[in-house]
Image: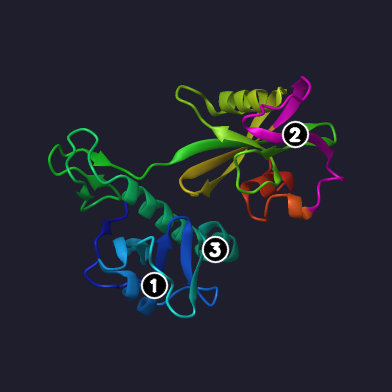
Amino acid sequence: MPIITKPNCLDADYFFVCKGNEILVKDNSFISKKEFEFFANETFSDDWYIEKNLSFAAALAKENCSAPENCKFISVRQFCFEHKETAFLASRAASILKQRSAFKFCPSCKGKLIDDETESARKCPDCKTKFFPRIEPATITLVSKGEEILLVKNKNSAYKNYACVSGFVEQGETLEQCVAREIKEETNIEVQRIKYCGSQAWPFPDQLMLAFTAEYKSGEIKIQESEILEAHWFKRTELPPESQLPRPGSVAWNLINGIFKS
């Protein structure tokens, strides 16, 4: 497993500075070691570390910090879509920084957590308990009925585009049970022939999306108003405008466009 340590030298190929759900860029690209060094101190940063085996350094900027000259903060999600070759590193850095910020003390004995020397974990020096970065599994499913597919708008999403039905896996559930439950709860549709297609890391902040397809079995659309704004059947040849669909490269876009094969 990778080692996360407080840096005593900035020996890395990539440098990331995050603030909330944003990441620092210079001229819409990567920042340099120079910009990173501006933040990697107690005046401007709440936390920073190097992950040596992946050759990147990450710093958590304080909320009142402004971007240096010729730099700006953009959303981590936007950065990952625009820089797919390093999306894994950037999203990992942002996700782990956020979790480190929120999880500083042992929930068992209240001891202050420190970095583990050998694994990507934090540990309690008092009770010796280790805490690894959290990953939350969620299913996302493209439901088909003949030549039509079911798309929904999620009420609680910042992006009010049409997408596939998704939801978090609950304790004791299989993935297939989660698929059926979420679709039934959110749209009143029952499905059959649930098939796993693939997965995609979605660390905004910490999801692992597990993609499925399913076929319509029965029911009429009745939305769960606390979760869903709209739900409709669309012919594959008559989908909503591109501006109302998921962005290319997202797990929902991959499902809609048949990138994931069941």
Contact check, label 1 and label 2, Cβ < 8 Å: no
Question: Residue furthest toward the front?
Answer: 64
x and y percentages locating residue 113 in the rendered image: 21, 46
**Which is nearer the eye, 135 or 260?**
135
Looking at marks 1 and 3 on the same chain, the residue that comes earlier in the sequence is marked by 1
Task: Classify 10 Å Cα crowding around label 2: few (below 14), some (14-19), many (20 and above).
Answer: many
Q: Which quadrant of the structure image shows residue 130?
A: top left
**Which is nearer the eye, 184 or 226?**
226
Whether residue 51 is visible to the viewer of this picture, yes or no, is no
Q: Residue type at mark 1?
A: Asp
CA–CA distance in space, label 2 to label 3: 29 Å
CA–CA distance in space, label 1 to label 2: 45 Å
Residue sitting at 74 percent across and 24 percent down? 222
Membership of 132 in magenta stretch: no
Give the magenta part as a residue range.
Answer: 214-241
Q: Answer left or right for 96 relative to 27.
A: left
Q: Answer left or right for 53 relative to 111.
A: right
Q: Look at mark 1 in the image and give the residue it sits on.
A: 13
Residue sitting at 38 percent across and 60 percent down? 63
Task: Classify 10 Å Cα crowding around label 3: few (below 14), some (14-19), many (20 and above).
Answer: many
Which label sits in the foreground, 2 or 3? 2
Whether residue 128 is visible to the viewer of this picture, yes or no, is yes
Q: Answer left or right for 139 relative to 189.
A: left
Q: Residue type at mark 2?
A: Ala
